[in-house]
Amino acid sequence: QLGFAFDALPPKPDSIKPKKKDQGQKSTESRGRSKDDDTWKSRLAQLKQFHAQSGHFRVPVTEKRGTKRPRASTANEVLDTETCKLGKWVKRQRRQFATDQLTPDRVAALTGIGFDFKPGNASKGERLEIQLGLLDSLRKRRELSNAQVA
């Protein structure tokens, strides 16, 4: 006698139409994620330029300089909105590669410039360069504070 609870429910109306698959979904262009080849190629050119200036592909996503994972070449990096957009583009390329959504020709173009899809941890030389850069900045700060006191 468990069916008595379901008998009290009102019948489901047949007039409700199911939504079509294209309703409510925005196209990729309206979300700002254009798959246009010209846009992609211009971002690739920006990435090449960033790599030529900084020597790595770890493009910052925000304008904040974090201390969690400092980069060795922060003096050579220009942090502006375009660089942050490039960083988000790089992050998207890595995510699409991980989920097999990146086309083979784009994978070939990125690997052709030496792009690392799984950057991981810094190498021993990079860590040493980071630590030396931090040490130099601490020395400069100490020199400035000593000069002001004396």
Image: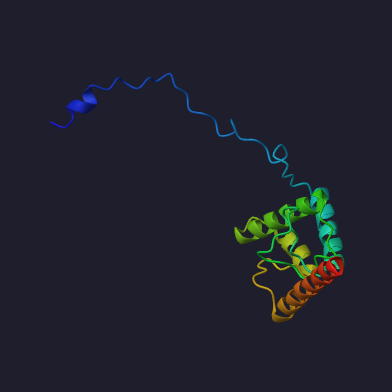
Foreground: 118 or 66?
66
Locate residue 64: give its quadrant: bottom right
Q: Quadrant of the N terminus?
A: top left
Foreground: 54 or 11?
54
Locate residue 72: give its quadrant: bottom right
Give the image location of residue 77, x and y in percent: 83, 62
Left or right placement of residue 2 versus residue 79 in this view: left
- The structure residue drawn at horizontal position 23% and vertical position 27%, both measured from the top left corner, is 6
Give the image location of residue 82, x and y in percent: 82, 50
Please tell me how many numbered marks the rendered image carries.
0
- The structure residue drawn at horizontal position 80% and vertical position 71%, both measured from the top left corner, is 142
Locate residue 134: give its quadrant: bottom right
- The structure residue drawn at horizontal position 61% and vertical position 35%, both measured from the top left corner, is 25
Give the image location of residue 57, x and y in percent: 76, 65
Give the image location of residue 79, x and y in percent: 81, 55
Left or right placement of residue 8 versus residue 33 in this view: left
Foreground: 49 or 23?
49
From this viewpoint, which residue is outermost toward the front?
Answer: 150
